[in-house]
Image (spheres, coloured by chain):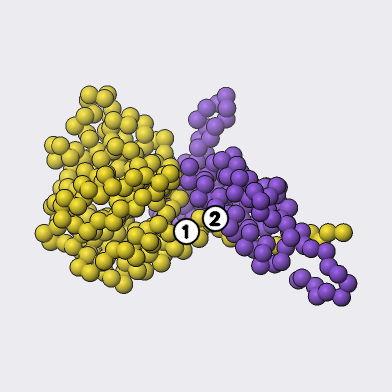
Chain colours: A yellow, B purple
Amino acid sequence: MHDVSKIYLGHDVIEANRALGNQNRAWLEQRGVKAINVMGAIGSGKTSLIELAIERLKGELGIAVMAGDVIAEFDSERFRRHGVKVIPLNTGKECHLDAHLVQHGLEQLDLEGVELLFVENVGNLICPSDFYLGEHLRVIVVSVTEGDDIVAKHPVIFKDADVAIVNKVDLAELVSADPEKMVRDALAGVGTAFKTSVRTGEGIEQWIGLVRKLAGSA
Amino acid sequence: MHEFSLAQSVVETVLQAAARHGAAAVEEVNLEVGEVALVNMEQLEWHIRVLTQSTMAEGARLNWKTAPARILCLECGYQGAVGHKELDSTSHFEIPIFECPACESPSTKITSGRELRVVDIHARFPEQAPGEADHA
């Protein structure tokens, strides 16, 4: 006769990722570094917005970037041109960064002189949501070219974010999208939402301002 | 495809616990899945089935129940279940509404409903020869 019994575990695997994220957060805090997790849709302009912030702020702040992507080399090369430290995080077939991968990235990254770390997530509005990385601020970027109902379709990732950016508003008319609706939809989840265009400069001051404010806050 | 990495964590949790307790096989795995955790259970089940092949959890029955989402309103202090909106009356597809049901403020925080918990497993233990120490 076989003996079958129940083993109680109560182990939450999403919470386990969060615990690793908390370790990353502690690592960053010990070194006085603030981190921004930049999430968003594929092609929404995450890389361009980060590049712009680097260009504007590298004179006043030590900046490093973790470029997360299926093949991270493409974006890493773009960031390197701005003269900042870059760690590529190749996810291979995975659609998101997790705290474990970021932990390995942090082990390789010399944070001496770094005050601000951008972590660019994989372009995806679903998978990254469940994975806290240890960041101080969660920013989510969408653009008008994804259609103006993109925000309403993904309520959970917006609920988890601190800031939403509706990018490429200069193209809104061409793609018949209503960026005001996107901002309204985003405000149902996040505290701050605004429109930007990397091309015309609209809203960029607000983006730079919030990055600067985070990096400057003790 | 983030279900694959979640499945890896679930399988690792199950196999480690089974080994720690000296089990011979795992017959059943019970999960609790938060209502707003972005987990596709069909995919998760498939990945778990593949990852447990040739392990002591191969063929284990997988059960799950949904843990409801709860929110805290930062305006009025409401704590409780989220509301739901039916998007499609033919399929009864519902989405959660994070707006406070009491004061309609959007300033709410999700306090639970994001989990993917391995609640317990049912394990089979090797038959014991008389006089052997109890596994407990």
| Figure quadrant of the N terminus of chain A | bottom right
x then y, percent, for residue A85 = 22, 59
x then y, percent, for residue A39 = 34, 47
The answer to whether residue B16 is left or right of residue B102 is right
Host chain of mark 1: A
Type of the residue with mark 2:
Ser
Labels 1, 2: front one: 2
**Quick one: which residue is furthest to the left in this view?**
A59
Type of the residue with mark 1:
Asn
Name the residue carrying label 2.
B9
x then y, percent, for residue A122 = 36, 45
| Figure quadrant of the C terminus of chain A | bottom left
Q: Nearer the viewer, residue B11 or A158?
A: B11
Asked if marks 1 and 2 fall on the same chain, the answer is no
Q: Name which residue lies at 61% across and 51% down.
A: B32
Q: Are the residues at dot 1 and dot 2 in contact (C-beta closer than 8 Å)?
A: yes
Name the residue carrying label 1.
A17
Host chain of mark 2: B
Label 1, secondary structure: give it: helix
Residue A49, compared with residue A31, is above or below; it is: above
The answer to whether residue B32 is left or right of residue A46 is right
Label 2, secondary structure: give it: helix
- The Cα–Cα distance between marks 1 and 2, rounded to whole angstroms, is 10 Å
Q: Name which residue lies at 43% across and 44% down.
A: A93
The answer to whether residue B61 is left or right of residue A117 is right
Residue A166, compared with residue B125, is above or below; it is: above
